[in-house]
Amino acid sequence: MRFEELHARRQRRELTMAEAAEMLGVTERTFRRWSTRYEAEGMEGLEDRRLGRASARAVPVDEALQMVTLYVQCSTPCSTTANCASNLPQGKSPMPSTAPLKS
């Protein structure tokens, strides 16, 4: 079912918010947020607002490329940890720290 139909049924109190949300496969909180935006802005309020914007949690392209390149270099059969370590930025280690944990 489309959101508009479920929203109308919710307005007529034929469905609870939880039932409408379940039919759409979203949480009740998401359905409530969508309802508020739909009532304020119509269908335009439901459009994805992230389109054209990068995720705030995205890894910078140059850093991802560097990681992939390092992975490819270190995954060759004749490669060693020492070879990988020489390609890392200064102060970085390919191995977890072996320092004792503080209590």
Image (cartoon, rainbow, N blue to C red):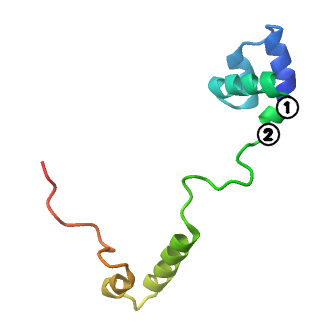
- Which residue is rendered at x = 67% and y = 18% of the image? 18
Q: Secondary structure at mark 2?
A: loop
In the displayed structure, does residue 52 sit left or right of residue 1? left
Does residue 55 lie above or below 20 as drawn? below
Residue 85 place in picture, x, y as percent: 33, 82
Kindly indicate the quadrant of the structure image that contains residue 60: bottom right
Which residue is situated farthest in the bottom direction here?
Answer: 78
Residue receiving disc 2: 47
- Which residue is rendered at x = 70% and y = 47% of the image? 50
In the displayed structure, does residue 93 sit left or right of residue 53? left
Q: Residues within 10 Å of mark 2 (few under 14, many from 20)?
A: few
Residue 96 place in picture, x, y as percent: 28, 67
| Mark number, residue 43 | 1
Mark 1 and mark 2 in contact? Answer it, CB < 8 Å.
yes
Distance of label 1 from label 2 (alpha carbons): 7 Å
- Which residue is rendered at x = 68% and y = 53% of the image? 53
Give whichever of 42, 8 is nearer the camera.
42
